Image: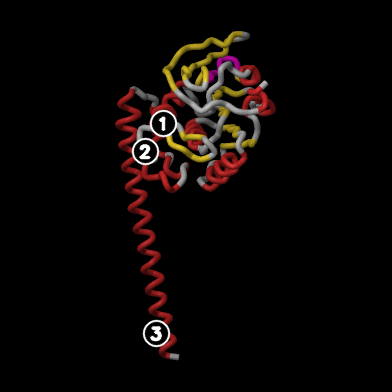
C-alpha cells in the first residue's frame, strides 16, 4: 500500500510538471505571436498609411495565426497572402486593413462579407461593427471558419454556406459590404442589398488583374472610385458562370 502511494505521488508530480510545461510553452508561443502581431501592425499597417484607430486595434487583437493551417502559422504575420486550402488564400494583412478602413465602419453597422475563407476578415470586421454576416461557397472552409469563430467566442458573426453572388437578402439592408474574391462586374443583388449611403469594397476586374474599388450607393447610382491595384482569387458559383 505504501509503495502504491509513492507511485501515485510520483505520477501526480509528473502530471503537474507536464501541465506547467504546457502552460509555459503556450505562454511563450502567445508572447511570440503577440510580438509578431505588433511588428506587423507597425511595419505593414501603420507605415503604409492606415490611420483608423478601430482598424489598428482590431489588427492588434485578432490572432491571425489561428486562422491558418498549423504548418504555415510561422508565416502568419508576414507581408503576403497565404494558402488556407481548397485553392483559397488568406489576404495580405495590409489589404485586410485597407479594405476594412475603406468601409468607414461604425459600431452600430451591419456588414455583409462575401467570401468568408478562413474567417479572419470577418473577425476583424466583428471587432468594429455590431453584426457581420459572412457567406462562403466552399463547404469545407465554411464549416471550418464557422467552428473557429464560435470557438473564439464571436457571437456577432453569422456564417452561411451558399453562393455569395446572391448575397443574404433576408438580412438586408447592410451598411457595408466587402467582397474578398474578384468579380468582373458588381453583382446586382449586392448593390440592391446595400443601404442608402452604404459603402462596398471589392476587387473588380479579370482573374489576373483587378482594381480594389470603393462603391458608394447614392439613390439609383453606385459611384465607383479606385483604391489600388490587387490580385484576388476569382468568385465562383453558378450565378457567376451564367
Question: What numbered label is drawn on residue 66?
Answer: none
As measured in the structure, the alpha-carbon distance from the residue carrying label 2 to the one carrying label 1 is: 9 Å
Q: Is residue 201 magenta?
A: yes
Element type where label 2 sits in the image: loop
Percent of width and height locating residue 34: 34, 43
Mark 3–mark 2 distance (CA, rounded to whole Å): 48 Å
Q: How many C-alpha atoms fall within 10 Å of the one at disc 2: few (<14), some, or many (≥20)? A: many
Q: Which mark is residue 92?
A: 1
Which residue is at a point 48% across and 34% down the rendered structure image?
Answer: 89
**Label 3 SS:** helix
Residue position for label 2? 77
Residue 6's disc number: 3
- Which contiguous range is marked in magenta? 195-202
First-in-chain label (2 vs 1): 2
Q: Are marks 2 and 1 in contact (CB under 8 Å)?
A: no
Q: Could you say where residue 221 lies in the image, as x and y percent from the top left?
A: 59, 8
Amino acid at each position: 500500500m505504501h509503495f502504491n502511494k509513492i507511485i501515485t505521488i510520483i505520477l501526480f508530480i509528473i502530471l503537474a510538471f507536464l501541465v506547467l510545461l504546457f502552460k509555459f510553452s503556450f505562454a511563450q508561443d502567445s508572447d511570440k505571436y503577440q510580438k509578431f502581431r505588433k511588428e506587423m501592425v507597425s511595419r505593414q499597417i501603420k507605415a503604409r498609411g492606415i490611420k483608423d484607430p478601430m482598424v489598428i486595434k482590431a489588427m492588434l487583437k485578432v490572432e491571425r495565426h489561428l486562422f491558418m493551417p498549423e504548418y504555415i502559422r510561422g508565416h502568419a504575420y508576414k507581408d503576403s497572402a497565404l494558402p488556407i486550402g481548397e485553392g483559397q488564400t488568406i489576404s495580405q494583412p495590409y489589404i485586410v486593413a485597407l479594405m476594412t478602413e475603406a468601409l468607414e465602419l461604425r459600431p452600430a453597422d451591419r456588414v455583409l462579407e462575401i467570401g468568408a475563407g478562413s474567417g479572419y476578415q470577418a473577425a476583424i470586421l466583428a471587432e468594429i461593427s455590431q453584426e457581420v454576416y459572412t457567406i462562403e461557397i466552399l463547404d469545407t472552409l465554411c464549416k471550418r471558419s464557422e467552428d473557429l469563430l464560435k470557438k473564439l467566442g464571436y457571437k456577432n458573426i453569422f456564417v452561411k454556406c451558399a453562393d455569395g453572388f446572391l448575397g443574404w437578402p433576408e438580412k438586408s439592408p447592410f451598411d457595408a459590404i466587402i467582397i474578398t474574391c474578384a468579380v468582373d462586374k458588381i453583382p446586382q443583388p449586392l448593390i440592391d442589398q446595400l443601404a442608402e449611403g452604404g459603402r462596398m469594397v471589392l476587387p473588380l476586374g479579370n482573374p489576373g488583374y483587378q482594381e480594389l474599388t470603393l462603391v458608394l450607393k447614392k439613390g439609383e447610382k453606385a459611384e465607383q472610385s479606385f483604391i489600388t491595384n490587387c490580385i484576388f482569387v476569382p468568385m465562383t458559383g453558378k450565378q457567376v458562370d451564367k
